[in-house]
Image: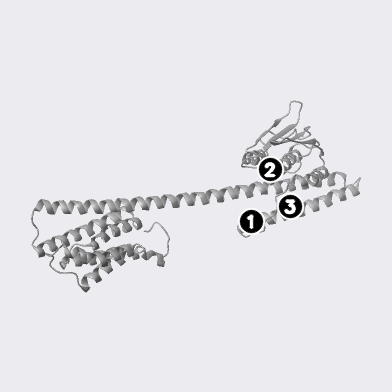
Amino acid sequence: MSTTAERPSPWDVWPALPFLAAGLIGTQAAAFFQPDAARPPDVLAYLLIAVAACALAVRHWPAPALAANGIAVTAYLTLGYPWGPILFTVPAIVCLVSIRWPVRRALVAVAAYLGVLIVAMFTKHLQEATLGDPVRLLSVTLIWVLILAAALVLGTAIRMRRAARADVRIEQARRVASEERLRMAQDLHDTIGHGLAVIAMQAGVALHVLERSPGEARAAMEAVRATSRESLENLRFALDALRSPGSAELRPAPGLAELPRLVDRVLAGGVEVSLDGAAGELPQPVDAAAYRIVQEALTNVLRHALGASAHIRLARTEEELLIEVTDSGGAGGGVPAGAGSGIRGMRAQAGALGGTLSAGPRTGGGFAVTARLPLTGEGA
């Protein structure tokens, strides 16, 4: 079985051209130095040379190529034509066949080819009465064994190298696909998870104040509706990307410019949030990662620290952006140290940029998330 899925093309004839030219041009010169040849080159000889060389052009079909070359070469030798450039096609066809076939199959075919070739050579010697010294004949046979073995090894090495390259490309494609799936999963977790947490908190507020303050309940339910629409829109984009990654509509990644809107949603969910500092204009990857980290940190507060207050601090230097999100704890006991995949996702966001993220309980109660994102370097 072939190691590649290449289709035949007009460019496949190029390996045959040098051998065809050498055979058509060099055979007559070779015959000049072999006056004892049983038969001088004629039209049939050049036809056999052309067949042997053109067999190299059909390398996508190794069996017919090897058979055509073998028939042409053995017929040329058996008919007593002079030794010539046609013999150059023998190691070439062996090399091409071993590129296309597995080692064991190629070895069997080459061994059979070698046996037929040796018989044709002895037949030629018999016709010309040049059998001579058996040691010389044995030496010639050994030389041809080594030549074909070298061609077989070369072709096998090329085949293995191509297979290794194909495996590397497949592995790279799998890794890229896996990374893309992980990124999409993280986006779903960040966007949909945050939206559902806000909806749950807003619905809880509405139920809590429904009887004594219908207006406040109505405002909470309107916030639920707005958050639901946004979550559904995010889900649609994510599903489109999963169905057709290459052709799905691209949605701009959110950044810290949307932080006030995020804070308003969390406020509507019943968590007091304060913001200190500013980040200014950031590289797009840093801006998107910073937003996701803040979003996930506030989502964890909504989920695990009921009634808590949260504080966001942004500080920027020339080299990095510092993000700190702390909460005061609450009825839920604060954010647990192993809060699902959220903290892992935040660490991955920071790590992708070459930054760091730490998350854990605060000494005085509550929970703190601190991230440092570099503003320069390959990731940014």
> What amino acid type is highlighted by mark number 3?
Ser
Q: Earlier in the sequence, mark 2 or mark 1?
A: 1
Q: Residues within 10 Å of mark 3 (few under 14, many from 20)?
A: many
**43 is higher (above) or lower (below) than 251:** below
Q: Secondary structure at mark 1?
A: helix
Colouring used for the render: one colour
What residue would you read off at disc 3? 231
Q: Which mark is residue 286?
A: 2
> What amino acid type is highlighted by mark number 1?
Ala
> In the image as oriented, which residue stretches furthest toward the top?
363
Q: Secondary structure at mark 3?
A: helix
Residue depth check, mark 1 versus mark 3: number of the one nearer the observer: 1
Rounded to the nearest whole Å, what is the CA distance between mark 1 and mark 3? Answer: 15 Å
Q: Earlier in the sequence, mark 1 or mark 3?
A: 3
Q: Nearer the viewer, residue 115 or 233?
A: 115
- The residue at 87%/44% (across/down) is 209
**280 is higher (above) or lower (below) than 31:** above
- The residue at 78%/51% (across/down) is 227
Q: Which mark is residue 241?
A: 1
Q: Quadrant of residue 352?
A: top right
Q: Nearer the viewer, residue 230 or 150?
A: 150
